[in-house]
Amino acid sequence: MNPAVNLVLVGPMGAGKTSIGKRLAERFGLAFVDLDHAIEAATGVRVADIFEREGEAGFREREARQLAIELDGEDKLVATGGGAVLREESRRLMRERGYVLHLAVSVEEQLKRLANDRVRPLLQRPDREDVLRTMAATRAPLYDEVADLRFDSSGLTPSQACEKLVPQLRDRWLRARAA
């Protein structure tokens, strides 16, 4: 068991990191941090604009710096972006400073949940399914590598997912913190 001081959510876009994360943060009395929103607040620039101006590499650099800032504190729930696991130093930091929950979701469910999305830069293409499958093949092993707990949110509302996760987190994460 990992008695970490923060809870970190990883997983693909559309898995529910923000919507489930907000509910979990409230249930456990944690400060909720959406990493993409924290980056936008720190830079004064939208994530889509950072991608456009600096490319994915520039965004990932900013993301890694903001993750380090957020995980320097305690009692936070940090909902990361889907690609936050791509950098080894970010995965190391997540493992050291957080109990990492991998919210998994099928590509089919992602396509349903993200059907009307016009914000995520990596999805602004006609071949969304291919993009999601390619990202899943690359990122799923990294999510599993860093995760203390894996939970499939497919077919669940955020409230249903939260209700199923609370007892698991109490048993696995909070019990370790209390020990």
Image: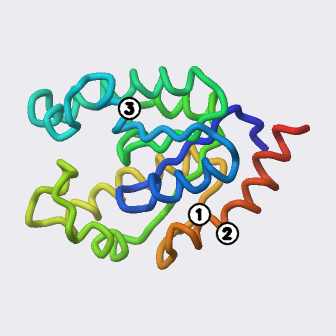
On the image, the x and y values in percent for residue 102 come to: 54, 54
Q: As rendered, which of 83 and 8 lies closer to the eye?
A: 8
Count of all numbered marks drawn on residues in the image:
3
User: Which residue carries the number 2 mark?
Assistant: 164
Q: Amino acid at mark 1?
A: Phe
Q: As rendered, which of 94 and 48 lies closer to the eye?
A: 48
Q: Quadrant of residue 5?
A: top right
Q: Is residue 10 left or right of residue 73?
A: left
On the image, the x and y values in percent for residue 10 come to: 49, 48
Q: Quadrant of residue 30?
A: top right
Disc 2 versus disc 1: distance between alpha carbons? 9 Å
Contact (CB < 8 A) between labels 2 and 1? yes
Mark 3 secondary-structure assignment? helix
Indicate which label's residue lies in the foreground, 3 or 1.
3
Q: In the image, what residue occupies the spot 46% across and 58% down?
A: 19
Indicate which label's residue lies in the foreground, 2 or 1.
2
User: Which residue carries the number 1 mark?
Assistant: 151
Q: Is residue 64 left or right of residue 8?
A: left
Mark 1 secondary-structure assignment? strand
Q: Is residue 5 left or right of residue 69?
A: right
Mark 2 secondary-structure assignment? helix
Contact (CB < 8 A) between labels 3 and 1? no
Q: Amino acid at mark 2?
A: Lys
Q: In the image, what residue occupies the spot 33% across and 76% down?
A: 108
Q: As rendered, which of 57 and 176 lies closer to the eye?
A: 176
91 versus 61 height, above or below: below
* Number of other residues with Cα within 10 Å of mark 2, as a class: few under 14, some 14 to 19, many 20 or more: some
Disc 3 versus disc 1: distance between alpha carbons? 25 Å
Question: Which quarter of the image is occupied by the C terminus?
Answer: top right
Q: Earlier in the sequence, mark 3 or mark 1?
A: 3
User: Which residue carries the number 3 mark?
Assistant: 38
On the image, the x and y values in percent for residue 153 come to: 51, 69
